[in-house]
Image (spheres, rainbow, N blue to C red):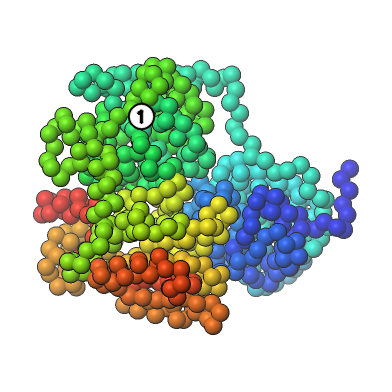
């Protein structure tokens, strides 16, 4: 029989369980139903409450925190708060992010009053399960806690599901239960992995054999195998970066990553050949990935539209190991887990081709074989050097461009700064432009499938507070339209003294990516007037983004805003970032980057060419 003492309450139980999982910060917006829990949280002292201006921003921060740390949490109040958090929770569900959504609801007594006499109080709905029902669509476990005796079991079940399924869970707790006694936490919360049993071994072996057969059936012209690995999001989500590094080191096999798995391992590894993103890839990367390699091995990669960059299919010379199974050409092997596949594939490749037997510089090989034009890289190091040196100081360009900014930032990160940075990239042009930055492991965060614009601003808060990346400054790239969605989260950066650098890519108050997706022909004539030919619904109200820093700054909480439009101004700003005594480094820095409305990242040129060809 479980003994319930007055020492432990439902609030204390949940606070202790969250702390046990290593959560150091809880993000959210308070409300009267949540107050008792936050009071207990502070008394326990293990978790810091981070109040954000919006519930959406809290969810974005918890999402990024979880990407870095392994699990995150946000807390809101019933209905009005929970429905605002829903978007972030939906994104975490799609992108497989372990997030705990805590929703404090009206007390049990008020629900009984509604049942008896139909009386509704603040935030209540006539549908008592309205919040629960919507969260069931975007979580792997959703619980309403109305009985303190059952609370420990419900909390433990949800947190176990969150860890095991690596997706969000939902805990709705009635206000008058927070201070009710319940049993103490017993066994630690642990991830419950799907077991690898004797039944799985033959399927794993057949999948590995099929991959080796595919490699053998697709040799290069010289008869040698020429595979390339495409490492993806699940390598990050399952924390398999070490296994991936072991595989490429033991076999020598060249590899690319998806955009969503960018910097899942160090991009200075000798086998790393770049980020592959379909037609939006860097031309050199596309060249070796699609034209030189003869088969592609996706390991944990998701076949999303953003990762495939305009491609709508995967050919018969592809392997795709994700979502708990492996497809090899037209064959499929269910219930093969990536964690078992990586070491098994490594052993098989070493046995078949010898240690380091697949080592190759595909850039050098392709260049030598095809006699490529001079502007093609003669080797992998040449390709990397071209990325890192193209953004050195230049005072000849008349104005900043997307590509000019990211080339310059790449040089800054690689050659000019000694600080560690976490690049947090928003959707659209910012994501496309930043994907070729050369970064260390863990140095890049993006939302690759859900693509909620403005995600990056709130996400930078979580990235900056996660223990594993707390030493690194967040560097955010966000479009002007996206920034208008979530600009108030700069208040959180300021309040916390987060030394973020937020580049707002202001292309003439314009939803550039939406114009590109709907009518890319607009970009085919850069000489036309800014407004000519643009769809009216893509035009934004103009803001002086840099001036918002003064709105959020306080006497003890500095924030700086700067507007730049010329390469020399960007050079000067980056030089200031290397000076620890410069005031711009005292708190968050908001940088308005003024671009021409017709400008776009070169990676999107394929859409413009295609639209011009159609016309």
- Nearer-the-camera pick, 380 or 193: 380
Please tell me which residue is depicted at 20% across the width and 38% down the height of the picture.
378
User: In the structure shown, which secondary structural element does the residue marked by tag 1 occupy?
Assistant: loop
Residue bearing the label numbered 1: 253
Please tell me which residue is depicted at 56% across the width and 60% down the height of the picture.
465
Visible in this render: residue 452? no
Residue 70 placed where, x, y %?
A: 57, 48
The quarter of the image holding the N terminus is top right
Residue 455 placed where, x, y %?
A: 44, 61
372 relative position to 463: left or right: left
Please tell me which residue is depicted at 59% across the width and 19% down the height of the picture.
198
- Please, is residue 541 above or below residue 184 in the view? below
144 relative position to 420: left or right: right
Visible in this render: residue 298? yes
Residue 510 placed where, x, y %?
A: 28, 69
- Nearer-the-camera pick, 271 or 54: 271
86 relative position to 455: left or right: right
Give the crowd class for mark 1: few <14, some 14-19, many >=20 residues within 10 Å: many
Q: Quadrant of residue 223?
A: top left
374 relative position to 566: left or right: left
Q: Quadrant of residue 326?
A: top left
Q: Quadrant of residue 564?
A: bottom left
The quarter of the image holding the C terminus is bottom left
Count of marks placed on residues: 1
Please tell me which residue is depicted at 35% across the width and 66% down the height of the picture.
574
Residue 601 placed where, x, y %?
A: 25, 57
- Nearer-the-camera pick, 213 or 147: 213
């Amino acid at each position: 029989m479980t003994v319930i003492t007055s020492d432990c309450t439902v609030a204390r139980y949940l606070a202790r369980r969250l702390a046990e999982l290593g959560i150091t910060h809880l993000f959210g917006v308070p409300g009267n139903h949540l107050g008792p829990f936050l009071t207990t949280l502070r008394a326990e002292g293990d978790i810091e409450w981070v109040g954000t201006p919006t519930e959406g921003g809290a969810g974005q921060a918890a999402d990024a925190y979880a990407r870095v740390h392994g699990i995150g949490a946000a807390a809101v109040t019933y209905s009005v708060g929970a429905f605002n958090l829903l978007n972030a929770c939906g994104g975490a569900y799609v992108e497989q992010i372990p997030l705990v959504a805590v929703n404090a609801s009206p007390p049990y007594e008020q629900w009984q009053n509604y049942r008896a006499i139909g009386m509704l109080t603040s935030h209540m709905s006539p549908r008592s399960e309205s919040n629960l029902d919507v969260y069931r669509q975007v979580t792997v476990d959703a619980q309403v806690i109305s009985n303190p005796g059952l609370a420990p079991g419900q909390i433990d079940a949800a947190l176990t599901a969150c860890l095991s399924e690596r997706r969000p869970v939902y805990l709705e707790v009635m206000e008058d239960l927070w201070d009710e006694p319940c049993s103490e936490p017993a066994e630690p919360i642990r991830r419950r992995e799907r077991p690898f049993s004797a039944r799985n071994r033959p399927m794993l072996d057949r999948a590995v054999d099929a991959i080796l057969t595919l490699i053998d059936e697709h040799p290069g012209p010289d008869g040698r195998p020429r595979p390339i690995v495409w490492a993806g999001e699940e390598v990050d989500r399952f924390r398999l970066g070490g296994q991936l590094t072991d595989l490429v080191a033991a076999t020598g096999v060249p590899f690319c990553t998806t955009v969503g798995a960018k910097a899942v391992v160090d991009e200075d590894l000798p086998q790393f050949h770049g980020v592959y993103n379909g037609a939006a890839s860097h031309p050199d990367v596309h060249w070796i990935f699609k034209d030189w390699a003869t088969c592609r091995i996706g390991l944990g990669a998701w076949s999303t539209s953003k990762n495939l960059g305009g491609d709508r299919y995967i050919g018969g010379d592809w392997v795709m190991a994700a979502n708990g199974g492996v497809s090899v050409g037209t064959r499929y092997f269910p219930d093969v887990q990536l964690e078992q596949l990586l070491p098994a594939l490594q052993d098989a490749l070493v046995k078949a081709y010898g240690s380091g037997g697949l080592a190759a510089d595909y850039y050098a090989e392709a260049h030598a074989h095809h006699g490529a034009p001079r502007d093609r890289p003669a080797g992998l190091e040449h390709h990397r050097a071209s990325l890192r040196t193209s953004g050195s100081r230049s005072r000849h360009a008349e104005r900043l461009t997307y590509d000019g900014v990211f080339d310059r930032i790449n040089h800054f990160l690689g050659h000019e700064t000694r600080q560690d940075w976490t690049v947090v990239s928003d959707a659209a042009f910012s994501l496309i432009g930043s994907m070729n930055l050369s970064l260390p492991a863990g140095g890049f965060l993006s939302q690759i499938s859900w693509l909620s614009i403005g995600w990056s601003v709130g996400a930078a808060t979580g990235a900056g507070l996660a223990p594993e990346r707390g030493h690194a400054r967040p560097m955010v790239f966000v479009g002007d339209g996206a920034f208008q969605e979530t600009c108030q989260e700069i208040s959180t950066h300021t309040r916390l003294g987060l030394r973020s650098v937020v580049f707002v890519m202001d292309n003439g108050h314009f939803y550039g990516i939406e114009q590109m997706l709907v009518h890319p022909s607009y970009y085919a004539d850069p000489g036309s007037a800014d407004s000519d030919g643009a769809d009216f619904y893509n035009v934004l109200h103009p803001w002086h983004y840099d001036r918002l820093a003064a709105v959020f700054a306080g006497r003890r909480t500095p924030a700086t805003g700067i507007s730049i439009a010329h390469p020399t101004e960007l050079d000067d700003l980056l030089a200031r970032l290397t000076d620890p005594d410069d005031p711009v480094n005292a708190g968050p820095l908001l940088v308005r980057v003024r671009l021409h409305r017709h400008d776009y990242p070169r990676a999107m040129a394929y859409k413009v060419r295609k639209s011009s060809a159609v016309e």
